[in-house]
Image (spheres, rainbow, N blue to C red):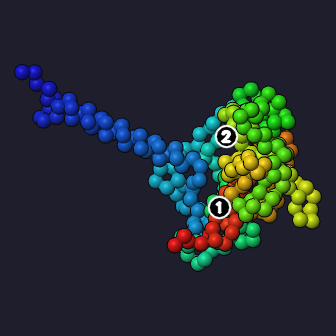
Amino acid sequence: MYNQYFAGTVDVTEIVLYLFFAFFFLLILYLLREGRREGFPLEDDVTGALESTPGGLFPSTPKTFHMPDGSKLVKPDASRDTHATQFKRTAAWSGTPIEPVGNPLSAGIGPGSYAVRADTPDMTNHGTTRLAPLRLATDYSIDKKDPDLRGFALVGLDGVAAGAIKDIWVDRAEFLVRYLEVDVTAEGGPTKHVLVPMTMCVVQKKLSRVRLDAVLGSQVAGAPTLANPDQVTLLEEEKIVGYFGAGYLYSTPDRSEPVL
């Protein structure tokens, strides 16, 4: 009978098993290192001081990423997240809850937190902006089976009108509606144009209106605006979605209270 043992009781099956264990360990080590390219080194929860060993036990070595637009991005780098947040701690030790200060929708914490992405628009492979209003994306149109929301009223979760829908922003890469552009008149101020995420809206066709279930009608006017009325940057998207996302917890006192 053919003998498959190499030495003692070590056979082919056992060697293959050991090789698999070694491969799996190296794979986990690689994934841990790659996962520490952003967000590391960690900061102390209270003092903000950086931890002594960057990246912990498995630090990532700098890697250069070649972006589609020809630019280069090196990660990890020495940059730190410095965007403004308004909050206070409920106690002076690590891990304690934090509460927003001022307008909770723009405090930048909890469901309203956002990442500091590039302040440039997302582009398609054809060199056009990925998101655009229908007034510019003339090769796109609303299906005849769906209502044209332009001219509809936008109301908040309380049913109070926030403004009128001026235009519809489409995603040229995924062929769907991303935002509704709304003309909002703030109290005592000029009319401003605000983008509202379509995923947070419910179309009420018979009432010729769109209901935004994230915030009150009066809170829509406080949403971030665009630097360029014809394009939205990645950073502006983060701030817009963060503002309305915070409404699911902070728009009314009842939403921030426990269910039971």
The three-letter code of the residue at mark 2 reads Leu
Mark 1–mark 2 CB contact (< 8 Å): no
Q: Earlier in the sequence, mark 1 or mark 2?
A: 2
* Displayed quadrant of residue 228: top right
Mark 1 vs mark 2, CA separation in Å: 35 Å
Question: How would you rate the neighbour count of disc 1 (Cα within 10 Å): few for under 14, some for 14-19, many for 20 or more?
Answer: some
Q: Secondary structure at mark 2?
A: strand
The three-letter code of the residue at mark 1 reads Tyr
Closer to the camera, 175 or 93? 175
Quadrant for the N terminus, please: top left
Q: Is residue 44 above or below residue 151?
A: below
- Callout in the foreground (1, 2): 1
Q: Secondary structure at mark 1?
A: helix
Residue 46 image offset from top left, x and y in percent: 60, 71
What residue sits right under mark 2 in the picture? 73
Q: Is residue 34 visible?
A: yes
